[in-house]
Image: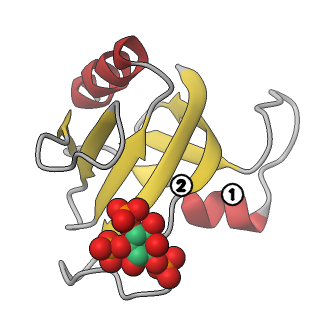
Amino acid sequence: KHGILTRKSHAEMDGKRTPRGRRGWKKFYAVLKGMILYLQKDEYKPDKDLSEVDLKNAVRVHHALATRACDYSKRQNVLKLKTSDWRVFLLQAPSEEEMMSWIFRINLV
Ligand code: I3P
């Protein structure tokens, strides 16, 4: 699955709140491949190598939990992604349908 996702980091690997200055929203081209959600700067090209930044932004979604971000109301179609290493991301999809689809696909991994 792939599509546009806008990300906000909420908590870090130690479970601590992401510090100010790194809590902003950022738009990515998202690709879910195997157990990894790639958050790329540019559109997906099958034969192009990932940049260092793209690799750094990749999230392992094995044993992660995706739910609708019911407690976040500033933006629409936002899902909450909790990873097995205690990171928390908010991910905004372009539509309700897309958000539901991402939740379903991430939880299948
Ligand atoms: C954050 C940025 C986010 C905001 C967040 C700020 O600043 O303005 O948009 O979240 O508020 O800390 P920075 O880019 O300097 O990290 P919202 O859009 O959800 O308000 P927060 O600290 O209350 O999460």
**Marks 2 and 1, how far apart in space?**
6 Å
Q: Is residue 59 above or below residue 63?
A: below
Task: Give the camera-side residue of 97 and 107.
Answer: 97
Displayed quadrant of residue 86: bottom left
Q: Are marks 2 and 1 in contact (CB under 8 Å)?
A: yes
Q: Quadrant of ligand 1?
A: bottom left
Residue drawn at point x = 57 percent, y = 61 percent: 57
Residue drawn at point x = 35 percent, y = 24 percent: 99
Q: Position of residue 18 (x, y in %)?
A: 33, 80
Q: Is residue 107 left or right of residue 56?
A: left
Quarter the C terminus occupies: top left
Please give the label number shown on residue 54. 1
Q: Is residue 73 left or right of residue 59?
A: left
Q: What's the residue type where badge 2 is placed?
A: Ala
Q: Secondary structure at mark 1?
A: helix
Displayed quadrant of residue 87: bottom left
Q: Is residue 42 above or below residue 90?
A: above
Please give the label number shown on residue 16. none
Task: Give the camera-side residue of 8 and 62.
Answer: 8
Please give the label number shown on residue 58. 2
Q: Is residue 13 left or right of residue 63?
A: right
